[in-house]
Amino acid sequence: MKIFYYIVYCYFSFFFVNAQINVPQNGKLIEKYNVLVEQEKFFQSDTTSLKAFIAPLSKHKSFLPIYYAFLANSRTSFLDEIDSKSKSLYKKSIAFATELNDNSLIVWSKYNYISHLYKYRKYQTMQPILLDLIENLKKMEVTEIIQPEDTFRTIGWIMQTFSDYNESDYY
């Protein structure tokens, strides 16, 4: 009986280790971005599984900012800090989004980075990126923003931290 459970465990372990992120084929690009961002998983120290999971993102140029952001988030989560490699990955995510000239991805990449800078109290690094992000957001419709609820909530918290209550109330 133990052998049976072991075989079942091995089978399901193999299935889950080899699972990949589901890249939607239909729908608007903003909808695809939302679906992808919602599928983020953390693999702690297992970078091989993480890279296998997000491999489909690396095959589409329009998803590269999300790919690098997921790598950065996982590394930051595992180390419990933003190191130079994580910082480089976050900046790569922003650079690819800027290269694509996709405002939704630019805003999300910056939001993703500042949310981690805020968590680790890197306020001086965060501030210019945050101000740029706020300017970008003011020029966009809510329907163009990836995960708008999370974005607005986080920016509101950050602005309260800086005692900018008027701006905080806006978000």
Image (tube, rainbow, N blue to C red):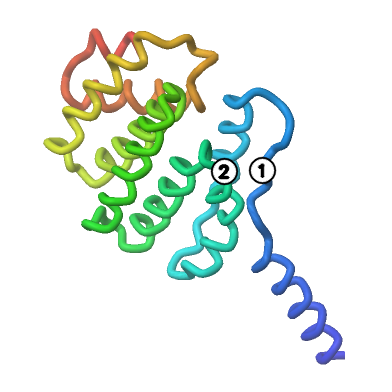
Crowding around mark 1 (Cα neighbors within 10 Å: few <14, some 14 to 19, many 20+) is some
Which residue appears at 37% of the width and 56% of the height? 77
Which residue appears at 38% of the width and 37% of the height? 112
Placement of the C terminus among the 4 image quadrants: top left
* Residue 7 location, quadrant: bottom right
Amino acid on which disc 1 is placed: Val
Which numbered disc flags the more N-terminal residue, 2 or 1?
1
Asked which secondary structure carries label 2, the reply is loop
Q: Which residue was labeled with disc 2? A: 60
In the picture as drawn, the residue positioned furthest to the left comes out as 124
Crowding around mark 2 (Cα neighbors within 10 Å: few <14, some 14 to 19, many 20+) is few
Asked which secondary structure carries label 1, the reply is loop
Residue 168 vs 44, above or below: the answer is above
Amino acid on which disc 2 is placed: His
Which residue appears at 30% of the width and 58% of the height? 80
**Rendering coords of residue 96 (x, y %):** 39, 38
